[in-house]
Each structure stands twice: as structure tokens, then as C-alpha cells.
Image: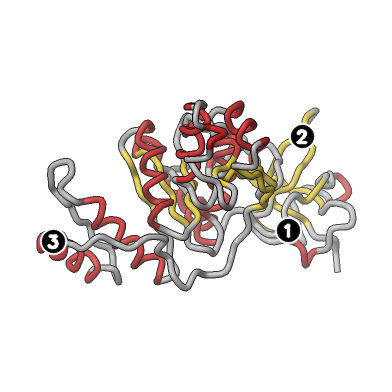
Amino acid sequence: MPDAILRLALPSPLRRLFDYRAPAGVLRAQLQPGMRLRVPFGRREMIGILVEVTDTSEVPVEKLKPALALLDATPPLPPALFKLCLWTSQYYQHSLGDTLSWALPVLLRQGELAEARQERFWSVAPGASLDDPRIARAPRQREALATLAQHPHGVAHQLLSKLMLSKDSLDLLLAKDLVQVEIRKHAPGARHEHWLAQPELPLNPEQRAAYEAIRAGFDSYHAFLLAGVTGSGKTEVYLQLIRETLEAGKQALVLIPEINLGPQTLARFEQRFNARIALIHSAINDRERLEAWLAAGTATPTLLSAPVRHCLRR
């Protein structure tokens, strides 16, 4: 059998694909459409996405350059999204390489591994109390401990500033054994038997009518508008519908209108659900965006909260 020829889409305005030989040591059976490969391109290196594996090329095989490395064990783009990108490129007559590249987070475009990194999580230590005499005259430490207590699943180190948590205060609390730090690596977990971390509120007749109407349309696409003044109970309807979604083994995407509503919305959802929640908006860095993108792609149902101005998501 002839050597496999890889047809790649590169982030270039050129509306064509580029042929390469497989990297040294990579078997044909390891290659799947949607995988990323590092390849030489002129005097530089680029990250290309595999579109197909073939046995023929318009370029003589001996003149084809080998790809430098296969970056993925499985395609970071799921088949449905990969197919959507192919259609989008054809429909809008745009470079497939550019289209596929923009479907990925920045770090994946740069060749970062598509896996979650290990991260520090801060949480309240067992038995810790706000009434501890050692923090009676330390208001900042008490405030930090109270904020941390609102997040029973812990707070990622990178989110401390978003929750106005002072690292200095947490270090002092750590020295007093009132908080603890745990190293975690996000990975798909087992499906929860009980998604609720706290009981739901009873719905009034108007909330119940909205809830039942929306739930009845779950099997197909429907658009609903809940109209009500602030404090009228719309969010509780959303929360209970999200619980139904999680119990069905699906995910929920919640769009919020302003970035500054992120921390309080995140806290409310964490208090209600035993579920991973990813928060994406334009103020987070590339690493945080990648972590949230990877979380949203796991099989475990995930809540993804994002401002409506930035809602292009996996």
C-alpha cells in the first residue's frame, strides 16, 4: 500500500488544500479528519487540520514534505462542528483553513494540547467557621472565607480576582487551616444521580405555566420569551428547566447580557447545581477560554454561561 497522503487545510486565505506525507512513526489508522498537525510551510511552521487521507496527489510523492507532528489523539472538533465548518466554507466561498482555524480557541490554533491542565482549587477546610476567634479582628479574611463558603465545589485559582478574593487573605487563612488547596485536573466525571445541590423554590401559577409550556417543547426547536420585571422570578424558571436538561443528559447554554453579571450568576448556579459550569467572555484570557471550551466539549453535561455579545461557542 502506498504511503498515506494527508490533505490539510491551513490558516491561509488561499481556497485550496495542501498535501503532505504523514509524520514519521504515525500510522494511517491513527489519522482522522479534524486532527491537527504541525507542518512546514515555506520558512515557517503552521498548524493544519486534516481534511482527508488519500493515496494520490497532483504533486509527485517524492516532492511532498512530511508533516512534523500529529498533535491530537482524537479530533478536537467534533464531527458535527467539522461538518458545519465544511458547509460554511463552501456556502460563503471562504478559505476552509481560515474557517476551521477560527472554530478553534487561540491556543489550539497555536498548537497547544487539547487537554485540560492541572489547576489549584481553593475551598473552605472541614470544620472551619466564620466565628473562629483567629479572624475575629481580620475583616478581609472573614470576607474571603465567607465568599469561599458560597462555592462548595471550590474556586479555581485563576478565578480568584473575578470573585474579589485576595490571595494574601487566602494565604493567611491557609496558614490557619481554615481553607485548603487541592490540585485537580478537569476530566469528564460520572453522571450525577442528583443534580440539585439545594432545593428548588416553589413556582407560582405564572411561573408554572411558563415552565410547563417550555418543557413541552423540549423535543424540537422552539423559541420562548419570558417577559417580566426584575425580581419577578424568570431566573427560577430557567434554573428548573436547566435541571430538566441536565437530567436528560444534555447541556445548557445560558447567555447573560453583561460581563459584570458573571460572578453573581456563576455563584447562583454553583449553589443550585452539582454540575461543572464554564464561564466565557471577552475579559478572560486565552487559557481560561481554552479550559471552558474543552469543558463544553466533554460528554458530561456542562453549564456554559456567556455574555450575548460573545456567543460563538462550541
Residue 38 against residue 274 in the figure, above or below: above
The amino acid marked with disc number 3 is Asn
**Which mark, residue 45?**
2
Q: Position of residue 156 (x, y in %)?
A: 58, 42
On screen, residue 16 versus residue 142, left or right, reads right
The amino acid marked with disc number 2 is Glu
For marks 3 and 2 on the same chain, the one whose residue lies earlier in the sequence:
2
159 or 112: which is nearer to us? 159
On screen, residue 257 versus residue 93, left or right, reads left
Residue 8 against residue 98 in the figure, above or below: below
For marks 1 and 3, give the CA distance.
50 Å
Q: Quadrant of the N terminus?
A: bottom right
- Residue projecting furthest to the left: 205
**Which mark, residue 73?**
1
Q: Which residue is mark 3?
A: 204
- Element carrying mark 3: loop
Residue at image position (40%, 71%) is 248
